[in-house]
């Protein structure tokens, strides 16, 4: 007894339709250069814009640096960028003080969230901090950034118990031992 093989039309009518999408461009993580400063400032602004109303004006201004302030970061911190097709889609910065590393200015453009870009940026900066013999990493964040807090906790960061004033709003310190 031979089983009937459905025709092409019968097969396609029974299967859910599939939407073909182009694969996302490859992400490159690299050190930032001075020519990246305006794109880094734009990335930070776009990433944090949805939270502006939850920040005091001074806290928001400190969170989204100007191009000139990014140039200062480039002189005093290790700044990495994530690029796709040559466009900056994410950034993170770190500084060191002996065995302590400190993260600052992590941002990923909204359309690049949930693509692994943030995890790759974090891993790259943590690797750099290890080469500097850092044994602990701190970062500061604010209560409105609930998704960022969950991301950091997923990657091993825990509240240190230190909370300071950040231009009129609580600034919560997280720490990770390497």
Image (spheres, rainbow, N blue to C red):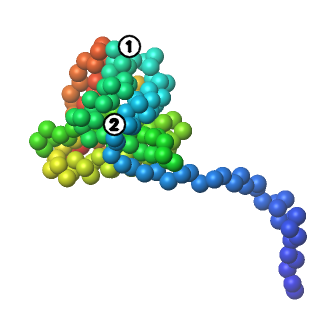
Q: Which of 65 and 9 is in front in this view?
A: 65
Is 12 placed left or right of 124 in the picture?
A: right
Residue at the image position 87 percent from the left and 64 percent from the top: 10
Crowd around label 1: few <14 · some 14–19 · many ≥20 (10 Å):
few
Which comes before the other along the chain, label 2 or label 1?
Answer: 2
Splitting the image into 4 quarters, where does residue 41 fall? top left
Q: Is residue 150 visible?
A: no
Q: Where is residue 24 in the image (x, y as percent from the top left)?
A: 56, 51
Q: Is residue 174 above or below residue 27?
A: above
Disc 1, SS: helix
Q: Mark 1 points at which residue?
A: 57
Q: Can residue 62 be seen in this view?
A: yes
Q: In this view, does 132 lie above or below 141?
A: below
Q: Distance between the residues labelled 2 and 1?
A: 27 Å
Q: Nearer the viewer, residue 79 or 9?
A: 79
Residue at the image position 38 percent from the left and 13 percent from the top: 57
Is 122 placed left or right of 16 in the picture?
A: left
Which residue is situated farthest in the bottom direction here?
Answer: 1
Is 83 placed left or right of 167 in the picture?
A: right
Q: Where is residue 86 in the image (x, y as percent from the top left)?
A: 48, 46
How many numbered discs sit on the rendered protein? 2
Q: Nearer the viewer, residue 161 or 66?
A: 66
Is 2 placed left or right of 41 in the picture?
A: right
Q: Is residue 102 above or below residue 9?
A: above
Which residue is situated farthest in the left direction here?
Answer: 98
Crowd around label 2: few <14 · some 14–19 · many ≥20 (10 Å):
some
Residue at the image position 85 percent from the left and 80 percent from the top: 3
Q: Mark on residue 70?
A: none
Q: In this view, does 110 lie above or below 23?
A: above
Q: Mark 2 points at which residue?
A: 34
Which residue is situated farthest in the front direction here?
Answer: 35
């Amino acid at each position: 007894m031979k089983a009937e093989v459905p025709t092409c039309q019968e097969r396609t009518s029974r299967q859910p339709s599939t939407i073909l999408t182009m694969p996302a461009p490859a992400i490159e993580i690299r050190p930032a250069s001075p020519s990246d400063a305006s794109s880094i400032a734009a990335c930070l602004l776009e990433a944090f814009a949805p939270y502006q109303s939850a920040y005091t004006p001074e806290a928001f201004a400190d969170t989204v640096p100007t191009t000139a302030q990014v140039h200062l970061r480039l002189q005093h911190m290790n700044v990495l960028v994530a690029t796709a097709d040559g466009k900056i889609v994410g950034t993170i910065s770190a500084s060191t003080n002996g065995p302590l590393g400190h993260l600052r200015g992590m941002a990923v453009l909204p359309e690049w969230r949930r693509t692994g870009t943030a995890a790759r940026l974090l891993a790259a900066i943590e690797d750099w901090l290890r080469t500097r013999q850092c044994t602990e990493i701190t970062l500061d964040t604010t209560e409105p950034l609930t998704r960022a807090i969950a991301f950091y906790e997923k990657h091993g960061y825990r509240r240190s118990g230190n909370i300071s004033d950040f231009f009129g709003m609580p600034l919560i310190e997280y720490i990770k031992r390497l």
